[in-house]
Amino acid sequence: MAATAEPGDTDGSSSCDMQGLATDLETTILSTEQQRVVLHRFTEARAAGLTRLEARLYAESEIDCGLLRRLVARGCRGRLLARIVL
């Protein structure tokens, strides 16, 4: 009788499944309010001149949004802004 594979069993042949599982484990489920905050922070960072990656890092961090706003108000943009806030 052949053994049947159970969910979660791996024989090493399905690295794609393992990558998917790792991605699922790393994913954080955010509440609607948290999603709005992250989106707002991302939009604000993009408007300030940060790249998409920099804006995402900023949006998902606990970096003080007041710092970003003060720097932008003083004319700081782009690479220098990213170096300071990230």
Image: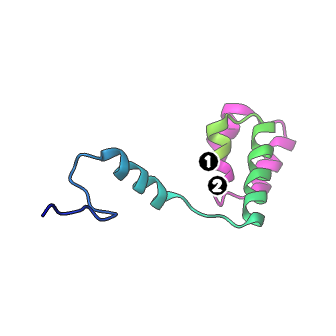
Would you name the residue on which mark 1 appears? 57
Relative side of 45 to 22, left or right: right
Q: Is disc 1 in contact with disc 2, using a CB cutoff of under 8 Å?
A: yes
- The three-letter code of the residue at mark 1 reads Leu
Instruction: In the rendered view, tell whether residue 3 sits above or below residue 45.
Output: below
Q: Position of residue 86 (x, y in %)?
A: 61, 47
Location of the N terminus (image quadrant): bottom left
Would you name the residue on which mark 2 appears? 60
Queried whether the magenta region covers residue 14, the answer comes back as no
Relative side of 38 to 23, left or right: right
Q: Position of residue 6 (x, y in %)?
A: 29, 65
Q: Position of residue 73 (x, y in %)?
A: 87, 43
Queried whether the magenta region covers residue 84, the answer comes back as yes
> On the image, which quarter does residue 30 sit in?
bottom right
- Residue at 61% x, 47% y: name it: 57
Q: Which residues are magenta?
A: 57-86
- The three-letter code of the residue at mark 2 reads Glu
- Residue at 82% x, 49% y: name it: 69
Q: Nearer the viewer, residue 57 or 10?
A: 10
